[in-house]
Image (spheres, rainbow, N blue to C red):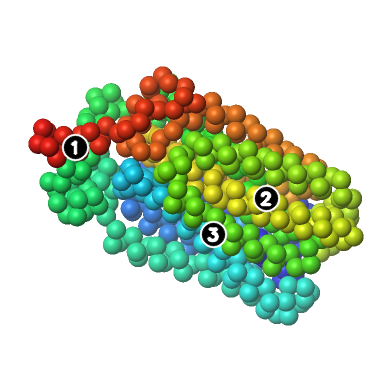
């Protein structure tokens, strides 16, 4: 939405009145995502992770068509809601699919690729929106035609078609196959992923044995339905997964994603659309360090560092806005959404706020952005993984929906204090992660029970090494078959 919010075509065609009106339109997609996330586990468990992703693609195509055809706010909201269902399903199932396919040594890197792909999608779509904003005389032309927003909404159909077709050539999750007692297919997929097709490879046999033992234990304990999620040893992981997704949303990144144009306009930037585009480039570039180094740094220090730095940056931005800003009022146009701006007499302060906004995006992209998807996807037992991750993702989208609706009136009613509010959320996230989030790097999915049930406080770390490595060595040495 960010690339079309400032165009005359969008403002005039839909006649959005007030901050709550735009908040309602924007929040329609995350509300659909919430619904999709809650439904995702039923689809993923019954029809497989692979087919769930393809079903999500169909929802996106239908939703995008409705958005393109929108002749008013009602159809636009419906289209965004339907497209949001896709986002909810995909954002729940894709990390699970990746985590279940990836070797433990690079699991963080593989799941982080989802976040990197998301940043690429955001970047490409933003520049499509930016380019389309020049149609019909440009964004400031009061008679600009609807092509300025219909073109971007049509282009987004293309990647969904590619995903729908491309998933046909990818394998089923070996762990999902195991839950359906399709063991022969499961070991063949493991062999293709980890043993170059050799089903007798020690690593393949070790992982197969771990999956088999973990699944047998879960079945003996009848751990396969939603009631399992409220058992104390699993509930604490569910709360942690949901909390990580909540803190990710409350970090303040939503302000930058949905309403960055408003932030730039409040800073009296000459070309808000162009200046805002730089943050999308940074979002792509700064996700790369997490992809390469998360499995070396670990999840825990990444989360802690990210919360502290984002908190500090938001406090500084809020202080600059408070000291140098002034009340503002406009009856119409893009600036009508703002009640507080920096006057043009302080260009250095405006530049500082833009720079701090960029640093904030860089910090989130390297820390919480990828880690908030990786961590929840790897901490649950196989039988309830899809269900638990769907709840964590539902937490993400419920807060995303609330913030998409709330940020415009927050910008209007509390102006610079909004930055301090989000800084406080980051401070709370830092304390929570320090007390509750153990390190998971280097552990197989089947070892997460050991990590969370060991009784060791998270700040004391976990025992190094992996049971899977020991098992693989014993098989390779001929001690186990």
* Lower sequence index among marks 2 and 3: 2
Residue 80 figure quarter: bottom right
Q: Residues within 10 Å of mark 3 (few under 14, many from 20)?
A: some
Q: Nearer the viewer, mark 2 or mark 1?
A: 1
Q: In percent of the image, x 33 and y 53: which residue is there?
A: 50
* Relative horizontal placement of residue 75, taking residue 456 as reference (left or right): right
Q: CA distance from mark 3 to mark 1?
A: 38 Å
Q: Residue at x 17, y 54 (%)?
A: 197
Q: Nearer the viewer, mark 2 or mark 3?
A: 3
Image vertical order of residue 390 relative to residue 138, above or below: above
**Residue 139: x percent and y percent?**
73, 72
Q: Position of residue 135 (x, y in %)?
A: 67, 78
Up the image or down, 268 lies above or below 291; here it is below
Residue under the image location 38 percent in, 34 percent down: 380
For label 2, count other residues whose C-alpha is less than 10 Å away and answer few (under 14), some (14-19) or many (20+): many
Q: Contact, CB < 8 Å: mark 2 with mark 1?
A: no
Label 2 sits on residue: 255
Q: Is residue 162 left or right of residue 208?
A: right
Query: Disc 2 to disc 1, how far (Cα)?
Result: 49 Å
Which element is circle 3 on? helix
In the structure shown, which secondary structural element does the residue marked by tag 2 occupy?
A: helix
The residue tagged 3 is: 285
Judged left or right of residue 189, residue 307 is: right
């Amino acid at each position: 939405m960010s690339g079309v919010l400032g165009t005359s075509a969008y403002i005039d065609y839909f006649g959005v009145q007030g901050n709550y009106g735009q908040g309602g339109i924007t929040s329609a997609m995350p509300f659909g995502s919430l619904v999709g996330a809650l439904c995702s586990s039923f689809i993923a468990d019954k029809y497989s992770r692979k087919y769930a992703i393809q079903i999500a693609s169909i929802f996106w195509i239908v939703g995008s068509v409705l958005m393109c055809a929108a002749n008013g706010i009602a159809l636009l909201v419906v289209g965004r809601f339907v497209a949001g269902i896709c986002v909810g399903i995909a954002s729940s199932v894709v990390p699970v699919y990746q985590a279940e396919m990836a070797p433990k040594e690079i699991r963080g890197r593989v799941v982080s690729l989802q976040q990197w792909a998301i940043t690429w999608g955001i970047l490409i779509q933003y520049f499509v929106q930016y380019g389309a904003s020049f149609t019909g005389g440009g964004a400031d032309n009061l008679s600009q035609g609807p092509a300025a927003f219909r073109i971007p909404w049509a282009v987004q159909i293309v990647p969904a078609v590619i995903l729908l077709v491309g998933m046909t050539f990818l394998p089923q999750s070996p762990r999902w196959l195991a839950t359906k007692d399709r063991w022969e297919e499961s070991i063949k997929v493991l062999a293709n992923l980890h043993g170059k097709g050799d089903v007798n490879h020690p690593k393949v046999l070790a992982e197969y044995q771990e999956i088999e033992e973990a699944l047998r234990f879960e079945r003996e304990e009848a751990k396969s339905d939603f009631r399992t999620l409220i058992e104390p040893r699993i509930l604490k992981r569910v709360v942690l997964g949901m909390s990580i997704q909540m803190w990710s949303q409350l970090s303040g990144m939503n302000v930058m994603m949905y309403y960055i144009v408003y932030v730039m306009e409040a800073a009296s930037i000459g070309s808000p659309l162009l200046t805002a585009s730089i943050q999308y480039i940074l979002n792509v570039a700064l996700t790369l360090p997490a992809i390469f180094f998360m499995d070396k740094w670990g999840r825990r220090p990444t989360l802690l560092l990210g919360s502290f730095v984002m908190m500090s940056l938001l406090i500084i931005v809020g202080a600059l806005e408070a000291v140098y800003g002034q009340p503002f009022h406009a009856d119409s146009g893009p600036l009508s959404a703002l009640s507080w701006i920096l006057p043009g007499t302080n260009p250095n302060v405006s530049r500082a706020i833009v720079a701090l906004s960029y640093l904030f995006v860089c910090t989130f992209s390297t820390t919480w952005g990828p880690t908030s998807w990786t961590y929840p996807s790897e901490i649950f037992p196989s039988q309830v993984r899809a269900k638990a991750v769907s709840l964590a993702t539902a937490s993400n989208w419920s807060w995303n929906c609330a913030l998409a609706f709330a940020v415009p009136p927050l910008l209007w009613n509390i102006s610079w204090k909004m930055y301090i509010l989000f800084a406080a959320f980051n401070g709370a996230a830092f304390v929570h992660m320090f007390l509750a989030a153990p390190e998971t790097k280097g552990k197989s999915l089947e070892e997460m029970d050991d990590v969370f049930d060991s009784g060791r406080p998270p700040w004391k770390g976990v025992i190094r090494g992996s049971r899977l490595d020991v098992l693989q060595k014993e098989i390779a040495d001929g001690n186990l078959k």
